[in-house]
Image (cartoon, rainbow, N blue to C red):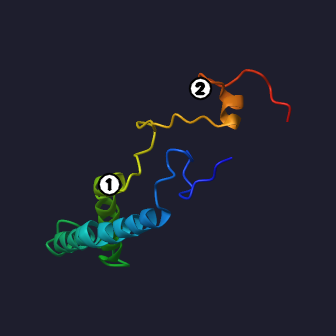
Amino acid sequence: MFQSKSGLHCPLSDAHINRKEVERVSQECRNESFWYRGLPLSLGSMLITQGLIYNGFLSSNPRFGSLPKIAFAGAFGLAIGTMSYIRVCQRKFQNIGVQPFGPEHKRDCHHTCKECEANFGSNGQENSKPSAS
């Protein structure tokens, strides 16, 4: 059986992808999504929430003050900001040769390994024969 350097599914079509390059782009995406989108949106939502509490549009907790609402706004802003960077990261991965994946994307791998052919046949449908194991 062929073993690919990248560790991705299809060893014949994915052999050209450099694992170090994928790791570099992944780290770059994590850093950029935090610094460019996550942190600014988090800080902005925390400031807006504090302003709303200060002006009386939101009430503060009698025991904890404004901390729970500000913490929630910060966490929510960080999550939304980080998720909004997904499209940029997808383009970066496509530029190095990693194709998009997921239910809406089909990978163009015309290679069929012997194990897959035994399990699914040449037409891609699962065989109805029970396995011996």
Residue 94 shows up from this direction: yes
Task: Tell me the quarter of the picture where residue 45 sits.
Answer: bottom left
10 Å neighbourhood of mark 2: few (<14), some, or many (≥20)? few
Residue 89 to residue 69: above or below? above
Task: Tell me the quarter of the picture where residue 26 sits.
Answer: bottom left
- Residue 43 screen position, x and y as percent: 24, 74
Give 45 or 128, whichever is nearer the viewer: 128
Residue 72 shows up from this direction: no
Instruction: Report which residue position mark 2 lands on.
Output: 124
Residue 10 to residue 126: above or below? below
Instruction: Report which residue position mark 1 lands on.
Output: 95
Q: What separation in Å lies between label 2 and label 1 (alpha carbons)?
A: 30 Å
Marked residue nearer the N-terminal end (2 or 1): 1
The answer to whether marks 2 and 1 mark residues whose Cβ atoms lie closer than 8 Å is no
- Circle 2 — which element? loop
10 Å neighbourhood of mark 1: few (<14), some, or many (≥20)? few
The disc at residue 83 is none
| Residue found 29% across the figure and 65% down from its top | 77
| Residue found 46% across the figure and 56% down from its top | 17
Give 89 or 79, whichever is nearer the viewer: 89
- Residue 58 screen position, x and y as percent: 22, 66
Q: Amino acid at mark 2?
A: Gly
- Circle 1 — which element? helix
Q: Is residue 25 left or right of residue 41?
A: right
| Residue found 35% across the figure and 62% down from its top | 79
